[in-house]
Image (spheres, grey):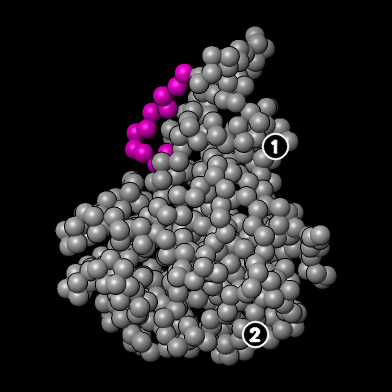
């Protein structure tokens, strides 16, 4: 297998029915877990209700949905598309997916927005503008975790709950921060550095559920042009568990919709674009996470069992969680964390680094923009512009205060002297975040990482005893 094919293989492996999209074969039926009668109570989420309905639609995302054999039929019945239109859409999505290049992912300007615009134009040429909007809404609903079964739909999410700290046990993933957190009864107990979806195949948002842990998963290559170019791989022929050609690593965790949390990533892929709509971890990370998830979900998974599954890589095993765990996928580029303001790059071109959102985040933490010093405001607004992902972005235009009572706080002579020469935020190309200390935010915000696992496998949370769980009346 030559180097180019290897690169193509590495790029596309998640875009399959058993990769970063839901399985659509008999294997899917084996892995399916019935929805429980009740699920954990959901605590506030940062996404507005409409956010789960406006997932980015790109042609590679559409291609992933076509891996589900029932999707074509749904387009005909729900959107009243013709056989010819569905065939043209499928061929278009396939051809565009084959053009993706892993090495260049994230290096261009406004890649996500360009991919969305390209999809809108090319899909519109086939089915028209109205049907294109309907298709985007339909895919967005399913991409955010919506299904035809009411019991499987995400719990209602409150509006404007920015940087919300869970009060229950759940997994929180914030894509722009390349971070996954594990909460137990409202207490953060473990954090992981992760890989996220490519700009053309972004990690979605919404509230999901993890119900099963699958050890040594198999992989069924899809019927894609790039698969035909690969040696020893044929579309539809299952790749065995433990095979070096299997991209899923030793463990995969379906989280509803076309998404997974899975291993198999190299440490170099963490903190980067690394998948097609999945949360990517290294092998040590996913093993550590699986044990923690099992205990939080009330399932039995000992160190001996984990080691046995790792030794026998050819046998697929499943562990069902007694308590399905909520998995919250967020897209927050402005985060107050442990007294500091973190502004992350707008990796998916969602135009979230705005003064309006900044004010909302600050106010959620009891602080107004006008409460900041002049130097702090200048730093923050400049960082917003620089981390927006827009080429040549200048300072964000300052808006007048919405209230005549609120006026900018004046800096004292001492503050002016201390802040001299520090009012400009220097941001290097491709910098992923800017962190600004703000006095008014001291002691406020989302918690800092706990026992952060950066992929080395050396940082682990103590799991000798089951984690303390919340007690509900």
Q: Does 397 appear in magenta?
A: yes
Task: Give the label, 1 or 2, closer to the camera.
Answer: 1
Q: Quadrant of residue 151?
A: bottom right
| Image quarter of the N terminus | bottom left
Where does residue 68 sit, x and y in percent of width and height? Answer: 37, 77
Q: Does 15 appear in magenta?
A: no
Residue 229 drawn above or below residue 173: below
Q: Report whether 102 appears left or right of 185.
A: left
Q: Which residue is mark 1?
A: 444
Residue name at image x 71 percent, y 57 percent: 168
Q: Report whether 78 appears left or right of 287.
A: left
Q: Which residues are magenta?
A: 387-400
Residue 13 drawn above or below residue 307: above
Where does residue 23 sit, x and y in percent of width and height? Answer: 44, 79
Residue 248 visible in rendering? yes
Magenta highlight: main SS? loop
Q: Which label number is shown at residue 309?
A: 2
Residue name at image x 41 percent, y 41 percent: 351
Q: Quadrant of residue 430?
A: top left
Whole-angstrom CA distance, mark 1 to mark 2, is 42 Å
Q: Secondary structure at mark 1?
A: loop
Q: Which label number is shown at residue 319?
A: none
Crowding at dot 1, Cα within 10 Å, few <14 / some 14-19 / many 20+, comes out as some
């Amino acid at each position: 297998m030559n180097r180019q094919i290897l690169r193509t293989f590495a790029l596309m492996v998640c875009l399959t029915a058993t990769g970063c999209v839901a399985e659509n074969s008999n294997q899917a039926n084996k892995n399916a877990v019935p929805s429980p009668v009740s699920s954990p109570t959901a605590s506030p989420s940062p996404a507005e209700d409409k956010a789960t309905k406006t997932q980015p639609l790109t042609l590679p995302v559409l291609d992933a949905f076509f891996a589900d054999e029932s999707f074509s039929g749904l387009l005909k019945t729900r959107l009243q598309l013709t056989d010819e239109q569905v065939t043209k859409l499928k061929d278009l999505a396939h051809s565009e997916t084959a053009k993706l290049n892993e090495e260049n992912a994230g290096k261009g300007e406004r890649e996500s927005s360009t991919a969305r615009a390209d999809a809108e134009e090319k899909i519109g040429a086939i089915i028209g503008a109205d049907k294109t909007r309907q298709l985007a809404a339909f895919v967005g609903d399913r991409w955010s975790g919506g299904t035809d079964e009411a019991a499987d739909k995400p719990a209602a999410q409150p509006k404007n709950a920015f940087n919300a700290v869970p009060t229950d046990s759940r997994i929180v993933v914030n894509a722009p921060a390349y971070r996954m957190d594990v909460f137990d009864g409202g207490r953060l107990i473990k954090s992981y550095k992760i890989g996220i979806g490519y700009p053309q195949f972004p990690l979605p948002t919404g509230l999901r559920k993890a119900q099963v842990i699958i050890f040594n998963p198999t992989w069924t290559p899809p019927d894609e042009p790039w698969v035909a170019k690969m040696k020893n791989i044929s579309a539809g022929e299952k790749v065995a568990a433990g095979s070096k050609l299997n991209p899923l690593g030793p463990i995969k965790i379906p989280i509803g919709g076309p998404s997974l949390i899975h291993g198999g990533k190299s440490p170099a892929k963490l903190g980067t674009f690394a998948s097609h709509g999945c949360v990517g971890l290294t092998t040590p990370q996913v093993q550590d996470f699986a044990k923690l998830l099992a205990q939080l979900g009330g399932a039995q998974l000992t160190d001996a069992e984990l080691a046995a599954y790792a030794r026998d890589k050819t046998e697929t095993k499943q562990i069902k969680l007694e308590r399905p765990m909520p998995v919250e996928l967020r897209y927050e580029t402005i985060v107050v964390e442990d007294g500091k303001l973190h502004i992350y790059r707008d990796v998916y071109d969602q135009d979230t680094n705005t003064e309006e959102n900044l004010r909302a985040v600050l106010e959620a933490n009891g602080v107004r923009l006008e409460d900041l010093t002049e130097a702090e405001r200048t730093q923050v607004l400049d960082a917003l512009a620089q981390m927006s992902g827009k080429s040549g972005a200048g300072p964000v235009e300052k808006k007048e205060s919405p209230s005549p009572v609120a006026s900018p706080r004046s800096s004292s002579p001492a503050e002016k002297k201390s802040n001299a020469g520090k009012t400009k935020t220097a941001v290097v190309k491709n910098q992923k975040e800017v962190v600004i200390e703000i006095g008014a935010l001291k002691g406020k915000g989302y918690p800092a990482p706990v026992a952060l696992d950066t992929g080395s496998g050396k940082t682990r949370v103590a799991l000798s005893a089951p984690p303390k769980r919340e007690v509900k009346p």
